[in-house]
């Protein structure tokens, strides 16, 4: 399994993903689930992936190949006119890859499925963020839904829902995401470090290289320990429920 989040802030976009893949408790590997294409000053595109590793690697390989030789391999993410068309192109490739693999292999519907988060900005247009489904269709982040998750999302979602603020800084957003990932990792062994994170400001169009956060990163350990202590303190400060027969017991 996996856990990935794309978040739309007033100041820009931020993405975080884990790197664990497993086919059983004794077969755990590390693969990046974050992929990026940049033309400085013209566009920046980030994709996060979850689901069948062979499917997502095949999709990313085709996108990389088209970006390297667009005239020989079809339309590239470096040629799309809008981020909507970028999400559409990636969705088409995802659906085609799943359909081809299903035709060649097992028949279980979910065997080759995958989901993608696609975000970025093209010069002259606002940044946009999409969640692409296995069928190739997609939804877009909005003011009502400013962050998108794929993979094992249920454990880390509550903190995002309660604490997200579109005006937060990137540092605050990283802290929030670390808490969300820490909660997920503690609840589910299929999600694990290291974590990859990248962000970019509106209209800069030149994303930084993804930063890798290892399991022993002191900032992450400080957030994890501090969050655990804060939860215990907050729990202790809550009033006991006043139910018949329960008081003092």
Image: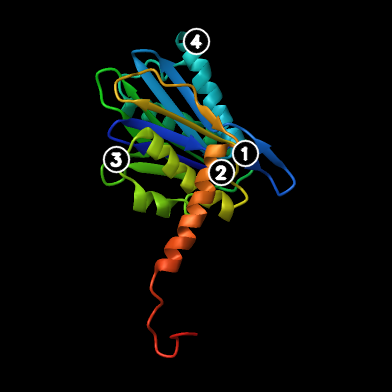
Of marks 2 and 3, the one in the foreground? 2
Mark pair 4, 1: CA separation? 40 Å
Callout 4 crowding tier (Cα within 10 Å): few <14, some 14–19, many ≥20: few
Mark pair 4, 3: CA separation? 38 Å
Of marks 3 and 1, the one in the foreground? 1
* Contact (Cβ within 8 Å) of mark 4 with mark 3: no
Residue under label 3? 166
- Compare marks 2 and 3 and give the one earlier in the sequence: 3
Residue under label 2? 221
Question: Mark 3: which secondary structure?
Answer: loop
Vertical side of 108 occupied by 248: above or below? below
- Render colour scheme: rainbow
Of marks 4 and 3, the one in the foreground? 3
Label disc, if present, on residue 69 of the rendered structure: 4
Mark pair 3, 1: CA separation? 29 Å
* Contact (Cβ within 8 Å) of mark 1 with mark 2: yes
Question: Mark 4: which secondary structure?
Answer: loop
């Amino acid at each position: 399994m996996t856990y990935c989040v794309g978040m739309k802030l007033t100041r820009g976009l931020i993405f975080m993903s884990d790197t664990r893949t497993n086919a059983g408790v004794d077969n755990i590997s590390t693969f990046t689930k974050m992929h990026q294409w940049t033309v400085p000053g013209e566009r920046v595109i980030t994709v996060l992936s979850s689901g069948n590793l062979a499917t997502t690697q095949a999709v990313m390989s085709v996108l990389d190949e088209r970006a390297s030789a667009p005239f020989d391999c079809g339309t590239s993410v470096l040629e799309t006119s809008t981020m909507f068309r970028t999400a559409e192109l990636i969705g088409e490739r995802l659906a085609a890859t799943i359909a081809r693999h299903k035709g060649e292999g097992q028949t279980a519907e979910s065997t080759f499925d995958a989901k993608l988060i696609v975000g970025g900005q093209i010069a002259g247009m606002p940044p946009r963020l999409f969640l692409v489904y296995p069928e190739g269709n997609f939804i877009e982040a909005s003011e009502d839904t400013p962050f998108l998750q794929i993979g094992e999302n249920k454990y880390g979602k509550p903190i995002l829902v309660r604490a997200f603020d579109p005006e937060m800084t990137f540092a605050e957003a990283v802290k929030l995401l670390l808490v969300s990932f820490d909660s997920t990792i503690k609840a589910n062994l299929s999600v694990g470090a290291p974590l990859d994170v990248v962000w970019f400001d509106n209209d800069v169009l030149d994303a930084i290289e993804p930063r890798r956060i290892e399991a022993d990163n002191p900032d992450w350990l400080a957030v994890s320990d501090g969050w655990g202590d804060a939860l215990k303190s907050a729990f202790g400060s809550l009033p006991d429920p006043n139910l018949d027969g329960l008081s003092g017991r």
